[in-house]
Image: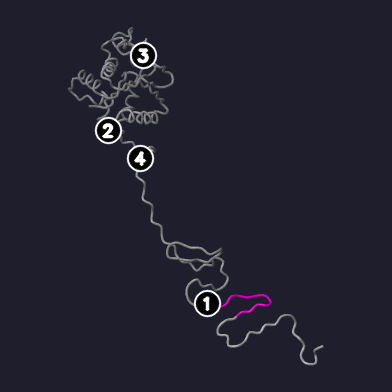
Amino acid sequence: MHEIFINYRTKSGKPVAYMCDEKLSARFGPDSVFLARKSIDPGDNYIETLDRAARRSRVLLAVIDEHWLDAPQRHEPAKRALDDPKDWVRREIEEALSSGALVIPLLIGRQVEQLDPHRLPASMAELAECQYSRLELHTLDADLTGLGDRLVRQVPGLAALDRHTGPDATTTAEEPEPQPEPTVRNDHQRGGIGQVGGSVGTFVNDAHGPLHTGRGDVYEGPRIEGDGTNHVAGDNRGGIRQRFGPRAPRGGDQQ
């Protein structure tokens, strides 16, 4: 059973019908799309095959260009093809409508107007009430992609066959790449004191002298500037003397 049946008039609708088949077959599989040229095997009864395929398909796409409505009969050009009950375009649409299939008129280009039920045979007038989809030749590929997206939402059987790999398709997120652990550098650091994750521990930025952040003694004192400052380093075994102001004169020099 084919999911999609492509209905078209051979003389004018063939190029678009073939492109529809190519695009939709690539997305849903070649066996899901019925096109008379490829789907009727040599020796098959084409009358029975066409009737059965149109009746059993879930979707019928009716390719309608500007010549479709008034196309003449092959053997009686003065008469309209759609007025002939044996016209294959008409018969296939009638079969699909009677079976309850989803029938979509594909209007090709801006020249084609929405169908008027009064200009259709009564047996297929319902076609004018089916919501159409318009295809533009210069955007046909994108238009058929959009059509396929809508069919997936409307026909559950097609959703199971969908091979779409475009931007909207669901993809598996890639695993994040492992990040290397931070390394300790001996470069001059600037800034404050902070914590670094991993194996570094505490780092000190803008250190201009010896600084110790672990255990043990600090052996080199800091740089000290200014008057009146005491600094004791190492083992101090004496007193601490400190003078402030100018030195006093000695002995007789005192006044």
Disc 3 is placed on an element classified as: loop
Q: Which of the 4 image quadrants contains residue 130?
A: top left
Instruction: Tell me the magenta residue range.
Output: 217-231
Between marks 1 and 4, how big is the CA–CA gap? 61 Å
For residue 218: magenta? yes
Mark positioned earlier in the residue sequence (2 or 3): 2
Mark 2 lies on residue: 29
Mark positioned earlier in the residue sequence (3 or 4): 3
Say which amino acid is labelled 2.
Gly
The image's colouring method is one colour
User: What residue is at 53 percent from the left and 64 percent from the top?
Assistant: 193
Which secondary structure dominates the residues rendered in magenta? loop
User: What residue is at 35 percent from the left and 42 percent from the top?
Assistant: 171
Say which amino acid is labelled 3.
Leu
Say which amino acid is labelled 1.
Val
Q: Which of the labelled discs sits on residue 218, or is there none?
A: 1
Question: Residue 63 in the image: x percent, y percent?
Answer: 34, 21
Q: Nearer the viewer, mark 3 or mark 4?
A: 4
Mark 4 lies on residue: 170
Mark 3 lies on residue: 69
Q: Which of marks 2 and 4 is in front?
A: 4
Mark positioned earlier in the residue sequence (2 or 1): 2
User: Which image quarter holds the C terminus?
Assistant: bottom right
Foreground residue among 34 and 212:
212
Question: Residue 150 in the image: x percent, y percent?
Answer: 36, 29
Disc 2 is placed on an element classified as: loop
Q: Which of the 4 image quadrants contains residue 47?
A: top left
Residue located farthest toward the left when viewing the structure as drawn: 43
Disc 4 is placed on an element classified as: loop
